[in-house]
Amino acid sequence: MNDDNIRTQMRKGMLELSVLLILQRGRAYPSDILRSLRESGMIVVEGTLYTVLNRLRRDGHLDYEWEESTMGPPRKYYTLSDSGLRLLDALIAEWRSISNAIGFFL
């Protein structure tokens, strides 16, 4: 496995948690989520983000609402549902557990 592939696989695993953490701050439009991810150093293409958002919504972890836009078609804004908040809590706990385990070896 080459270095780029390793980084890609590790980032994929953290994308769902990152999206939920962004939405924990409040509702967001997908381009706002992408901007936050890129500012953090996570390079994510739009199609990958929409796949994650659709899966989380389908599983009941996200809600959305349409808002009229003065610059084009209506925009879909995402928020965490109660189920999404519970999932976020579980993922944070798992992240801390994994981080502590890896930290043992560093």
Image (tube, rainbow, N blue to C red):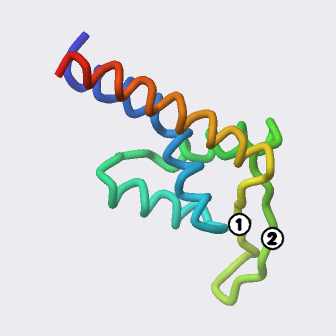
**Residue at 71% over, 66% down:** 77
**Residue at 57% over, 34% down:** 91
Helix, strand or loop status at disc 1: strand
Residue 18 rendering spot, x and y as whole percentages = 49, 46
Residue 55 rendering spot, x and y as whole percentages = 71, 37
Q: Residues within 10 Å of mark 2 (few under 14, many from 20)?
A: few
Query: What type is the residue that disc 2 sits on?
Result: Trp
Say if mark 1 contacts mark 2, CB within 8 Å: yes
| Residue identifier under label 1 | 77
Q: Residues within 10 Å of mark 1 (few under 14, many from 20)?
A: some
Which of disc 2 and disc 1 is earlier in sequence? Answer: 2
Instruction: Identify the image quadrant of the C terminus.
Output: top left
Residue 23 rendering spot, x and y as whole percentages = 61, 58
| Residue identifier under label 2 | 66
Helix, strand or loop status at disc 2: strand
Query: What type is the residue that disc 1 sits on?
Result: Tyr
Instruction: Identify the image quadrant of the N terminus.
Output: top left
**Residue at 72% over, 55% down:** 80
